[in-house]
Image: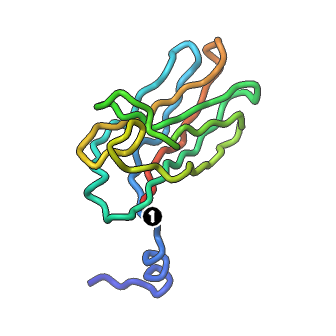
Amino acid sequence: MPFQSPFNAIRNQFRIPQITITEGQSVDATSGVLATGQFGLNAANYPSGAVFRFRSTLSVSSGALTGTVLLYNLTDGEVVSATTLSTSSTTPDSQVGLDIPVGVIAGNLKPSLKTYEVRLSVTGALPTDVAFLGSAALVII
């Protein structure tokens, strides 16, 4: 067994599990919505009472723009509730959304296998109007 320092053991004990969905993406205003990072998820595979939150690091090329990222249920054709995050910051802005409901109602993470994807967009009309997504992840608490 490899040696693990006491510091690493403590850090790993308190690490929050997450599913990294996508990293290093960008979209300009003339390209429309960028769909990226498709993955399958069955929320019922997690312990009862598990809390899911959407987390992203996002920025835009100009403060006059708004970049938006969200989680989309591709199987059912619906935006997942509490996952739309936006910024007008020109420096990377890390955000964590609210608790995402789990259930069969539209907008919830579903307790059956569904395909989800991250969608990235930016306001504006020029090719220089860009949203940069550093990362998007699903945090499980």
Q: Which amino acid does label 1 sit on?
A: Ile
From the viewer's perspective, is residue 67 above or below residue 123?
Answer: below
Q: Quadrant of residue 78?
A: top left
Q: Quick one: label 1, few (<14), some, or many (20+) residues within 10 Å?
A: some
Q: Percent position (x, y) of residue 33?
A: 49, 22
* Residue under the image location 46 percent in, 87 percent down: 6
Between residue 99 and residue 106, name the one nearer to us: 106
Q: Percent position (x, y) of residue 48?
A: 33, 64
The answer to whether residue 61 is left or right of residue 40 is right
- Which residue bears the numbered disc 1? 141
From the viewer's perspective, is residue 23 above or below residue 7?
Answer: above
From the viewer's perspective, is residue 81 above or below residue 26?
Answer: below
Q: Which residue lies furthest to the bottom in this view?
A: 6
* Residue under the image location 71 percent in, 33 percent down: 88
Looking at the figure, which quarter contains the N terminus?
A: bottom left
Between residue 74 and residue 126, name the one nearer to us: 74
* Residue under the image location 56 percent in, 13 percent down: 30
Q: Quadrant of residue 128?
A: top right
The answer to whether residue 129 is left or right of residue 73 is right
Q: Percent position (x, y) of residue 92?
A: 65, 43
- Report helix, strand or loop for mark 1: loop
